[in-house]
Amino acid sequence: MSSLREIETTLTSIWMERQPVESAQSLSCLLEGEKFDADGASLYARLIGYGHSDVISSIYPYCAKVLNRNWEKTIKQYVKMFPPDHFHLNSSARKFPQFISEHCPELLDKLPYLGELADYEWLEMELLEIDTAISVTSKTPLSEPQAFVSLGPVINPTLKVRTYKYPIQQIVDLIDDGKGFRKKFRPAQSHVAMYRDPYTHKVRIVDLDENAHTILSEADRSSYGDMARRAVELNPTRNPEKSVADVIEMIEQFHDINLFVGERKIGT
Amino acid sequence: MPDFLDTKKLLPNLGIGLGLRRELASQTLENRSKIDWLELVPENYMGLGGASRERLESARDQFPLVTHGINLSIGSTDDLNTEYLSKLKKLLDFIDAPWFSDHLCFTSLDGIYMHDLLPLPRSKEAINLIAEKVKRVQGTIGRPFLLENISYYMNVPGSEMNDSQFLAEVAEKADCGLLLDVNNVYVNSLNHEFDPFQYLDQIPLERTVQIHVAGHKQGADYVIDTHGSAVVEPVFELLQYVLERVDAKGVMLERDQNFPAFEEILAEVDKIRQISQAADQVRQAGSAPRAHSAVKTFERDRKASTIGRKEMAEVKHARVLSA
Ligand SMILES: [Fe+2]
């Protein structure tokens, strides 16, 4: 007589399409002449497969569009290699970027940015769900000179910044645009800032240029004055007043879009 | 813990509720006067922030809440997932749920989650395992636990008894409550050709604390429990039959996809309320027959339509999708 463990293992292997349906016929718990319910088992395999495909497609709509006819096949290979290992359904999609980057050399040959695109899409998902409270406090107008020296920004605690080899945000915009999406892109380093808005709970995405990226990466230990100084340093050939005006505008903008969520006193 | 039936006497009467779903959340929260309580899928809230957290807090501020889990995997020969249990306990403490529930099934094995409600062999070994795990779950969580009868679409090898016997023995041995899904009883009665009223007579109905009412869909070979269409009359009849015999502490409508105008959902909630009120009177007057005497006719129409691939993709027991 088959043990419960043996029955569950056999069924799971069939439902996850790791073993053919016929293999269940060898279960010793089947009575003489009893046929294993292959139709029912296949229905479960389909339901489970659709469930996984559904959730992965909903998290990676851009990868799905780029891969087009190869999408379903890629998902199947992914689930086979990285079966869902967490009780959170969305978590079953978390290793997809790793799968693309490490196990799909043929896809990467044609679409070398695909791993980064997958990372971009997972990051958005992760930030939507991350259990981090975001408190927003008021800020002093930067027109007050004292604020420059004594204050610095508080960064939205959900902020993640990625540096990609490819212009991922541009690729995403082109896919959204729908028209004339070409699949070939030259490498061009890009910086993307992603964070969750404390009010709408949606993920906001900011494309950063090289200098904005540098200044933002130092912002948690800078005063507003330090940030302005850095902007001048990074643009040695530019009129310093213009650089300072630009950085003030950027700081105000970051507050407006809740990338900065408050201010901190320097030295405390 | 005292015997479950003593525990049940102390549970509050929640009334008529609705499943809290992301797509319906704002309308649900606006209709506090028409909906008495909400059931939520804990996996959609455990350890999650952002919109989920905000929805949870708004719901908790306005409604009594209970949870209905997917991934406890009570029938799995894997041990209980301690991370899952501790996150569930935290959530249940936060909403101060009068009870919590999951399904009589397994959803994971060897740490792999299939994210579907999978049928078990109806065996003594499974009953013993589940009873032992339920006792540990109730001990860890410290709140009354209910198991729901699932709909199932295959004959699982190694089964030694029918579904009603299995459910009855699990509930008695584990000494837990029942979340009776009358739509699942109906769907199973069509797919596996039994009399749903007889089924109800064979299970310990007195353990029923909560009842699910839902819609289903005709597939190619099976009737599928989709929670995606209107509730059919025979399911309301089963609800009435149960409520005329036992005092359930909460009845609720499950609607998870293919959402109609919210008024239609409220109309179904209202219909459940009317059936519940009428049945209460019958029960209190003691005028319900002890068991279903004559077998009611039930229509069987398995091949009525073919379920297409797109429709199959809609077939979900519960989704845990992001915002
Ligand atoms: Fe249900």
Image: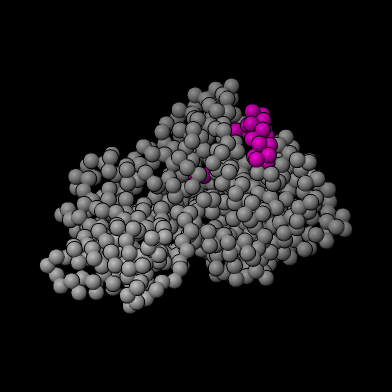
Main secondary-structure element of the magenta-colored stretch: helix
Residue at 49%, 24% (x, y): give it: A26
Asked if residue A164 lies in the magenta stretch, the reply is no
Against A24, residue B54 (above or below) is below
Residue at 55%, 28% (x, y): give it: A5
From this viewpoint, which residue is outermost toward the bottom? A143
Asked which quadrant contains residue A257, the reply is bottom left
The answer to whether one can see residue B151 in this image is: no
Q: Nearer the viewer, residue B103 or B312?
A: B103
Residue at 55%, 38% (x, y): give it: B81
Q: Nearer the viewer, residue B111 or A238?
A: A238
Q: Identify the colour scheme used.
A: one colour
Asked which quadrant contains residue B267, the reply is bottom right
Asked if residue B121 lies in the magenta stretch, the reply is yes
Q: Nearer the viewer, residue B318 or A206?
A: A206
Q: Position of residue A246 (x, y in %)?
A: 24, 72
Q: Quadrant of the N terminus of chain B?
A: top right
| Side of A256 where B269 appears, left or right | right
Against A72, residue A16 (above or below) is above
Bounds of the magenta span?
B115-140
Against B140, residue A233 (above or below) is below
Q: Position of residue A240 (x, y in %)?
A: 18, 71
Q: Position of residue B247 (x, y in %)?
A: 78, 53
